[in-house]
């Protein structure tokens, strides 16, 4: 019974200390905006990865079965 109350008090004290540290910590500088070439490169790379993922996820048909189907 008393152990639960002590646990809650310790938790509250720790949470208050962490909140205080978070408010006192220096904030990182905001990033500068990305330049257009960097955005274009990122977009190209992203779409290339999507294409590779789709190719890996799509089951392949056996080559002999594919030619047999379209020879007729």
Image (cartoon, rainbow, N blue to C red):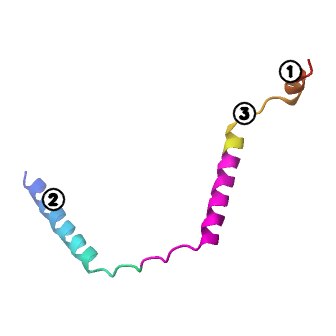
**Secondary structure beneath label 2:** helix
Q: Which quadrant of the rendered structure holds the C terminus?
A: top right
The residue wearing badge 3 is: 59
- The span shown in magenta is 30-53
**Secondary structure beneath label 3:** loop
In this rendered view, identify the residue nearer to me: 40 or 11. 40
Q: Quadrant of residue 54?
A: top right
The residue wearing badge 1 is: 69
Is disc 2 in contact with disc 1, using a CB cutoff of under 8 Å? no
Q: Is residue 27 left or right of residue 6?
A: right
Mark positioned earlier in the residue sequence (2 or 1): 2
Q: How far separated are the C-alphas under marks 2 and 1?
A: 71 Å
Which residue is at a point 25% across and 76% down the rendered structure image? 23
Q: Quadrant of residue 8?
A: bottom left
Q: How far separated are the C-alphas under marks 3 and 2?
A: 55 Å
The residue wearing badge 2 is: 7
Front label number (3 vs 2): 3
């Amino acid at each position: 019974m008393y152990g639960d109350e002590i646990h809650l008090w310790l938790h509250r004290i720790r949470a208050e200390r962490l909140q205080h540290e978070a408010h006192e910590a220096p904030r990182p500088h905001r990033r500068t905006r990305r330049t257009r070439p960097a955005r274009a490169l990122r977009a190209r790379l992203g779409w290339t990865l999507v294409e590779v993922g789709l190719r890996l996820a799509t089951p392949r048909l056996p080559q002999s079965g594919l030619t047999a189907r379209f020879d007729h």
